[in-house]
Image: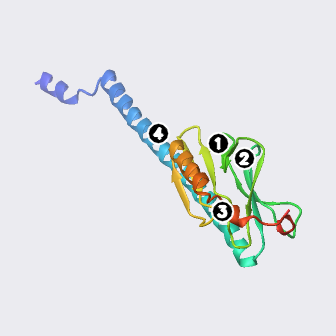
Amino acid sequence: MKSSISSKLRGFTLIEVAAVIFIMALLAGATVLSLAHVADRQKSESLRDQLERVDNLVRSAARQGSCCQQLIYDLDDKTVLWPQTDSKNPLQMIQLKQQDTLEVIEGEQEFTSGQVAIDFSPDGYSHSYALKLVDPLQDAHWMVVAGLSGRISWTENQKRVDAIFRSLSTEGLRATAVEVPDENMVH
């Protein structure tokens, strides 16, 4: 009788408890890593949406005000600026994270530092350009902007970006028809 009672009252051994705690810790760690990856992806998508909205906003402001506008990508300070006609200080539209990098291709020129100004005509036209957004935790993403239409597309393939600019160059479509005299430009 004693042996049957002692077997019913017997608890878990220390090794069994440790194994269960270890498995629970592994599952919790996997969940946290999975959620962190989702959060990083959401932040990246949010930044891409912001970049698109800023281009569309400046393009629309040029059309609505029938005046030239400018968008400045400051690659060193990792900011996107919009100079205002009534202010000496440009409006900061986006501040990238310190670990992100931004590069710009306009025409046949590639920029990795300094400030790159994208000029918009009173009709909202600009040169075609591409932004390369590099997040150290994710792949590079290219935002390609067709200057005449304002159409924006995203790709992760630099060869595709190069092909787009080659086709623009060979077809002569690069925004040469929208050159604007300097006196109309916002400084």
Q: CA distance from mark 4 to mark 3?
A: 34 Å
Q: Tag 2's secondary structure? A: loop
Q: CA distance from mark 2 to mark 1?
A: 8 Å
| Contact? badges 1 and 4 (CB < 8 Å) | no
Instruction: Write down the residue under mark 2.
Output: 78
Query: Marks 2 and 3: which is nearer the front?
Result: 3
Residue at 59% x, 50% y: name it: 165
Residue furthest right in the image: 88
| Contact? badges 2 and 1 (CB < 8 Å) | yes
Q: Amino acid at mark 1?
A: Asp
Instruction: Write down the residue under mark 3.
Output: 55
Label ID, residue 100: 1
Q: Earlier in the sequence, mark 1 or mark 4?
A: 4
Q: Earlier in the sequence, mark 4 or mark 3?
A: 4
Label 4 neighbourhood size at 10 Å, few (<14), some (14-19), many (20+)?
Answer: few
**Residue 6: x %, y % from top left:** 19, 25
**Residue 86: x %, y % from top left:** 87, 70
Query: Marks 1 and 3: which is nearer the front?
Result: 3
**Residue 159: x %, y % from top left:** 52, 42
